[in-house]
Image: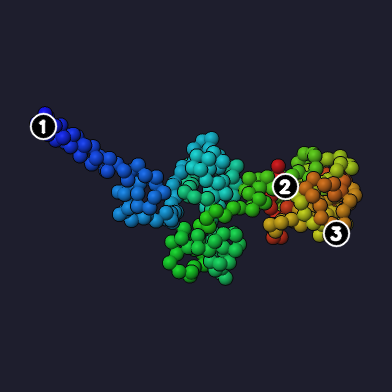
Amino acid sequence: MQLKEKYFHIGYAGLFLPALAILLWMAPHRLPHSHPGQGQPALLPMALESTEPAPRRLTFIPYKVAPGDTISGIAEMYNVTQDSIISWNSIEKARTLQIGTILQIPNMNGLMHEVKAGDTLDSIARKYEVDAQSIREVNELEEDSIQVGQRLFIPEAKLPAIELRRVWGELFRYPVRGWISSPYGWRSDPITGARRFHNGIDIGGFEGDPVRAALDGRVVETGYNESAGNYIFLSHVGGYTTFYAHLRSIHVTPGMYVREGQKIGEVGSTGYSTGPHLHFSVFRWGRPVNPVLLLY
């Protein structure tokens, strides 16, 4: 009996001690993670890593324009805005991409800014309403000195809506329903036959047809002269001015603000004219622009 008891106690101890060791090893792992120093003891010696992301580096991918390509399609393909592609590649006519043209596609959204005399990083940042530090980082500028003519990428900047409309050829609405009876450019004078430059387009119509503002703007001048007959000048954002001539009647006065599509006069044949039509001109900073490129 004593011999059996001796072996029993030895056997029990042999089973108990390993089990106790396992329980002691598991105990810290079974405690809630809220206990300091418990739960994940193996992670304690590890150094904490910084969560601050590294500055994103600006890169460009060359893309060759293929048949059927559009700015919107390319922008969607590379997950950037149309503004970014249009601005960096100095695209003036988004609707007429030339097949084979090599475009540089940025890997982030933003605009190109060419440094002009008097520019500083702070003034550029204010202009585009972005942080000056982001301009420094993206363009890898070690100091604030920039050179005239230098091209900078302005991250997250966007083109003004009017500039985007201009590039897409959708800046001005047709001011009157009708047909183009005389285009922009050099032509033979319809009365004398002399070669003259026509700084607008003539849109044929019917006497009394409504003439509407081609874009929101302010009336800067109305009047009459022997050449234009009854006329109206409207001023618009972006340095644009529109001119409406040979009107039968004028329905606005200088200083008035008008909305796009608002009636401002009626088609007539006053002044130097051979019949009812509207002479329509577009100027930017005082220089004539072909209206057909901007009308929709």
Q: Quadrant of the N terminus?
A: top left
Instruction: Return the residue nearer the eye: 132 or 293.
Output: 132
Is residue 230 shown left or right of residue 131?
Answer: right
Q: Position of residue 106 (x, y in %)?
A: 48, 49
Mark 3 is surrounded, within 10 Å at the Cα level, by few (under 14), some (14 to 19) or many (20 or more) other residues, namely some
Question: Element under label 2?
Answer: loop
Residue at 44% from the left image edge and 50% from the top image edge? 60
- Mark 2 or mark 3, which is nearer the start of the sequence? 2
Whether the residues at callouts 3 and 2 have beta carbons within 8 Å, the answer is no
Query: First in sequence: mark 1 or mark 2?
Result: 1
| Residue drawn where x is 59% and y is 50% of the image | 92
Task: State the residue in front, 14 or 209.
Answer: 14
Whole-percent x and y of residue 205?
A: 83, 40
Residue type at the position of mark 3 = Pro
**Relative vertical location of residue 154 with respect to residue 202 in this rendering, above or below:** below
- Can you give x and y, in whole percent of width and height, for residue 289 in the image? 69, 53
Secondary structure state at the residue bearing disc 3: loop
Q: Which mark is residue 172?
A: 2
Q: Which residue carries the number 1 mark?
A: 2
Residue 131 position within the rendered picture, expressed as x and y whole percent measured from the top left: 54, 61
**Residue at point 60%, 46% (across, down):** 93
Q: Would residue 42 be found to the left or right of residue 248 on screen?
A: left
Q: Contact (CB < 8 A) between labels 1 and 2?
A: no
User: For the residues marked 1 and 2, what is the alpha-carbon distance in whole angstroms?
Assistant: 112 Å
Q: Amino acid at mark 1?
A: Gln
| Quadrant in which residue 219 is drawn | bottom right
Dot in front, 3 or 1: 1
The mark found on residue 254 in the picture is 3
